[in-house]
Image (spheres, rainbow, N blue to C red):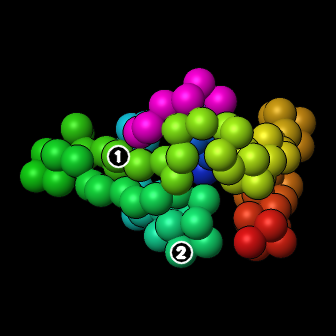
Amino acid sequence: MNYPVSDMVVRIKNAYKAGKENVNIPYSGLKENLCEILKKKGFIEDYSIENADSVPLKSIKVKLACSSTDSCPEVLIFFINFLAFSKPFSASLKSYSIFIISEAL
């Protein structure tokens, strides 16, 4: 996986759009920290570490703030407006992704 943070945000966005209550994301310390920020800002309800004893199976289970896009459109707008660039712009992906998250929150 080339862009784990973008993958995480896209998974959450797609889960919101599909009306899911939870989404599983492959674990990393950075993603866990981002989940904490998203939780504090109200973009997700909660998260938990799944299979913490097994490193290859370790994941983050994210409980979404709402299962209907009608009940929390501002959350969906945040995730829809998340931008990720393709490989020609990969040098600026990290800084731009962090910029979007910090500016939006």
Three-letter amino acid code at the position of disc 2: Lys
Which quadrant of the figure has residue 47?
Answer: bottom left
As drawn, is 96 to the left or to the right of 35?
A: right
State the residue at coordinates (55%, 29%): 19
Q: Is residue 79 above or below residue 13?
A: below
Q: Is residue 1 visible?
A: no
| Image disc number at residue 40 | 2
Q: Can residue 23 be seen in this view?
A: yes
Comparing marks 2 and 1, which lies closer to the viewer? 2
State the residue at coordinates (67%, 38%): 69
State the residue at coordinates (81%, 34%): 87
Q: Nearer the viewer, residue 76 or 97?
A: 76
- Report x, y in % for residue 45: 46, 59
Q: In this view, does 91 lie above or below 88?
A: below
19 part of magenta stretch? yes
Q: If you read the primary sequence from the N terminus, does the residue marked by circle 2 or circle 1 appear first?
A: 2
38 part of magenta stretch? no
Which residue carries the number 1 mark? 61
Image: magenta residue range: 16-22
Q: Is residue 43 above or below residue 63?
A: below
Q: Nearer the viewer, residue 30 or 100?
A: 100
- Report x, y in % for residue 15: 55, 32
As drawn, is 41 to the left or to the right of 74?
A: left
Give the quarter of the figure containing the C terminus: bottom right
Distance from label 2 to label 1 (Cα)? 16 Å
Give the quarter of the figure containing the N terminus: top right
- Report x, y in % for residue 32: 42, 62
Do tag 2 and tag 1 residues touch (Cβ < 8 Å)?
A: no
Tag 2, which secondary structure?
Answer: helix
Three-letter amino acid code at the position of disc 1: Lys
As drawn, is 2 to the left or to the right of 53?
A: right
Label 1 crowd bin: few (<14), some (14–19), many (20+), radius 10 Å: some
